[in-house]
Image (tube, rainbow, N blue to C red):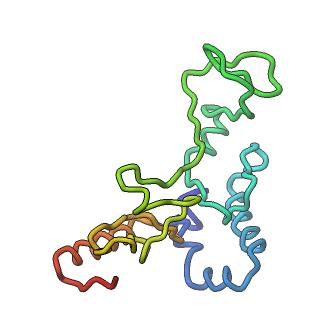
Amino acid sequence: MYRVGPFGAPFDSSYIYRFGFLLFKILPFAVSCYYFELLVNFRFDHAKYGIKPKHRILGQHPMINDALPNRILSGTVMLKGDIQEFTENGIIFKGDDKETEVDAVVLATGYEVYFPFLDKDLVWAQDNEIELYKCMFVPKLKHAHTLCIIGLIQAFGPAIPISEIQVRWFCELMLGGMIPLI
């Protein structure tokens, strides 16, 4: 998915707006996915290059990368299939008999939410879901407003401004400028 949308405007501000949310609410999920997939594949056909994901575009967070399609087209990034086995100097890919020498392997296997520095009885993520009040505070604490988890949000659009608002709110609580709601 590209950062730049139509007429040089940011992609998210071109397609994520109130009318778009209204359409998303009234249209079936499959129709919304089809529309966004058309927009994204208009510039770079993911199926043609073998990188179409198994899920629909709105089923998970999309990867935003302007450089990847150009790198694939220019040959500086080569797409390969599944790994059959690792060797001392490289990899043998499924369906390939010869070894491909590689300098590095990046395993992008996903992301798991956990907090090794906190007691598991206090904060525990089940299937990357965590129970937080206002997506920030641990309700199990006696003084829940004294521990805040910033940025653990699922946003439509950029998450950084939301994280900044969370930081401001928490600072106001700590400075006594606001009364805790919990």
> Residue 81 in the image: x percent, y percent?
74, 34
Q: Give the residue displayed 54% in from the left and 50% down from the top.
A: 111
Furthest-left residue in this view: 175
Q: Is residue 173 above or below residue 95?
A: below
Q: Give the residue displayed 28% in from the left and 75% down from the top.
A: 143
Please tell me in which quadrant of the rendered image residue 98 appears: top right
- Quadrant of the snapshot with the N terminus: bottom right
Count of numbered circles on the image: 0
Q: Give the residue displayed 56% in from the left and 67% down from the top.
A: 7
Q: On the picture, is 62 further left or further right than 83?
A: left
Q: On the picture, is 171 further left or further right than 162?
A: left
> Residue 150 in the image: x percent, y percent?
36, 65
- Quadrant of the snapshot with the C terminus: bottom left
> Residue 100 in the image: x percent, y percent?
68, 19
Q: On the picture, is 42 further left or further right than 133?
A: right
Q: Is residue 128 above or below residue 48?
A: below
Q: On the picture, is 175 further left or further right than 58?
A: left
From the viewer's side, name the closer residue of 23 and 6.
23
From the viewer's side, name the closer residue of 60 and 70.
60
Q: Give the residue displayed 20% in from the left and 74% down from the top.
A: 174
Q: In this view, does 78 lie above or below 41?
A: above
